[in-house]
Amino acid sequence: MNIRDHLFEMQDLAYRNFHSKLIPTVDKDRIIGVRTPKLRDLAKELKGTDEAEEFLSVLPHYYYEENNLHGFLLEYIKEYDACITALNEFLPYVDNWATCDMMAPKCFKKNLSQLDEQCKLWIADGGTYTVRFAVNMLMKYYLDDNFSPEYSELVASIDSEDYYIRMVVAWYFATALAKQYDAILPYLENRRLEAWTHNKTIQKALESYRISTEQKQYLRTLKIRKLTL
């Protein structure tokens, strides 16, 4: 049985109908309807096999779940350079926020001194989900002990009208407020972000349990309101 047949064996049509509404950039006929835990289990089962290597070598995939499985298999690549090469082959074919946001290769944790430079290259690439993936990695790995203001400057410098890029930038700054409040607050006080992203950052920060009541009260005063004549 090939991988696609295996995916259809796990199909849940009710889940397909529900999940398709969450990823409007993917046609419903390209969604099989396989729950993420089952995809992760399949990736764990396939990792390191000839079948997995053959699957990873064939791009683009047709089905949404095939892309997700591809991303989960990439997480198991142990050698950093090989993982980056495989990601660079795959990212141009990522066509939705969910596939993009699910990926977090395990080898990145041991290679943070190199990953930040790669994130800069991904952001310079300009592709919607390549940029989004880079910001996700900066948010995941560089907002705690490895935080540096240069990363926030890099994210703030992203100039895009794409909804999925603006949204991840807002998520980055909302998360950064929770972890590096004093360093990040000036981005809002000085209106460094585009207006929609600025307000979305505040909205997401207000929803966070990691930001204090006093901080939220102040953030509300920074919201950009439309001028009325």
Image (cartoon, rainbow, N blue to C red):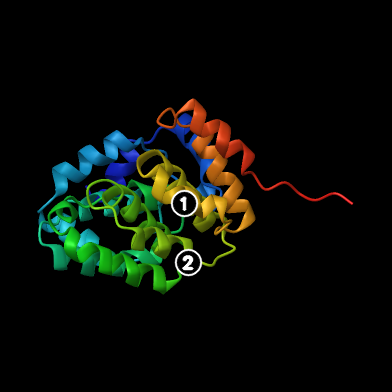
Q: Position of residue 59 (x, y in %)?
A: 32, 66
For the point 57% across and 45% down, which residue is it?
200
Vertical arrangement, residue 134 with respect to residue 22, above or below: below
The image position of residue 152, as x and y in percent, is 40, 58
Q: Secondary structure at mark 2?
A: loop
103 sits left or right of 190 in the view:
left
**Looking at the image, is mark 1 or mark 2 earlier in the sequence?**
2
- At which x and y percent is residue 139? 35, 50
Neighbourhood count class around disc 2 (C-alpha, 10 Å): few under 14, some 14–19, many 20 upward: few
Q: Nearer the viewer, residue 91 or 228?
A: 228
For badge 2, the amino acid type reads Ser
Report the Cα–Cα distance between label 1 and label 2: 13 Å
Q: Is residue 189 above or below residue 130?
A: above
Q: Name which residue lies at 21% across and 41% down.
A: 42
- The amino acid on which the numbered mark 1 sits, given as a three-letter code, is Val
Is residue 163 or residue 150 the one in the foreground?
Answer: 150
Residue in front for this viewpoint, 122 or 41: 122
Outermost residue, right side: 229
Q: Is residue 79 above or below residue 174?
A: below
In the foreground, 54 or 156:
156
Query: Pointer 1: what residue?
Result: 168
The numbered dot on residue 157 is 2
Q: Is residue 26 visible?
A: no
Q: Quadrant of residue 52?
A: bottom left
CB-based contact (under 8 Å), mark 1 and mark 2: no
Task: Classify 10 Å Cα crowding around label 1: few (below 14), some (14-19), many (20 and above).
Answer: many
Residue 105 placed where, x, y %?
21, 52
